Image (cartoon, rainbow, N blue to C red):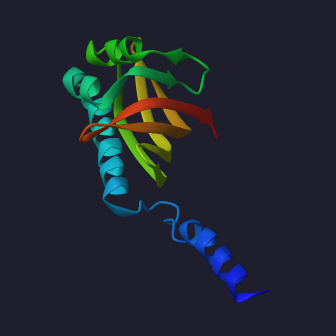
Amino acid sequence: MSVSRRLALAAIAAPVLMRSRPGRAAGQDGAAVEDAVDALTKALLTGDRAALEALTHDGLSYGHSSGLVQDKAAFIEPLASKRASFPRIALSDRSVSVVGDDAIARHVFTGESVADGKTSPVHIGVMQVWHRDGPRWRLLARQAFKI
């Protein structure tokens, strides 16, 4: 293989090879997305309407592991009104990949949910799509899946 061809392949491969390992976000953008994921988790735990509003995009598509898909209002209302809650949430196997003004965050969500007075264990996989909106990251889409 010629030197110029090797250099061309190295130039193409370098960005892929320099990506962060799973569970680690590269650079300031990745850290900011991880902070947004943590802020959303805290808002889920507290049912903080203002925080949930600020952290989610107006065009939100929020998919549950049951197949239910909600818009922003339908996602926030049960949590903010305390009709549904999460007493406990732990995230593991986290990863973030940033591409321009968008990011994909993945994790395993383990905890408990309470709806209609019934407590249920939760152990699901989650993929979130975040979009940079000015200086902040906002959740644009989320899809959960059964593990």
Q: Residue at x 57, y 73 (%)?
A: 14
Residue nearest the viewer, comparing 41 with 15: 15
Q: Is residue 137 left or right of residue 71?
A: left
At x 27%, y 32%, the residue is 43
Q: Is residue 15 left or right of residue 53?
A: right
Residue in front for this viewpoint, 79 or 58:
58
Q: Residue at x 56, y 32 (%)?
A: 144
Q: Quadrant of the N terminus?
A: bottom right
Give above or below for 93 relative to 74.
Answer: below
Question: Where in the figure is residue 36, as x and y percent of width and height?
Answer: 31, 43
Q: Quadrant of residue 39?
A: top left
Q: Nearer the viewer, residue 65 or 141?
A: 141
Q: Quadrant of the C terminus?
A: top right
Residue at 27% x, 12% y is 81
Q: On the picture, is 100 further left or further right than 137?
A: right
Q: Where is residue 132 drawn, in percent x and y?
A: 35, 39
Q: Position of residue 10 (x, y in %)?
A: 63, 77
State the residue in front, 23 or 129.
129
How many marks the image carries: the answer is 0
- Is any atom of residue 47 visible in this view? no
Q: Is residue 126 above or below residue 6?
A: above
Q: Give the quadrant of residue 76.
A: top left
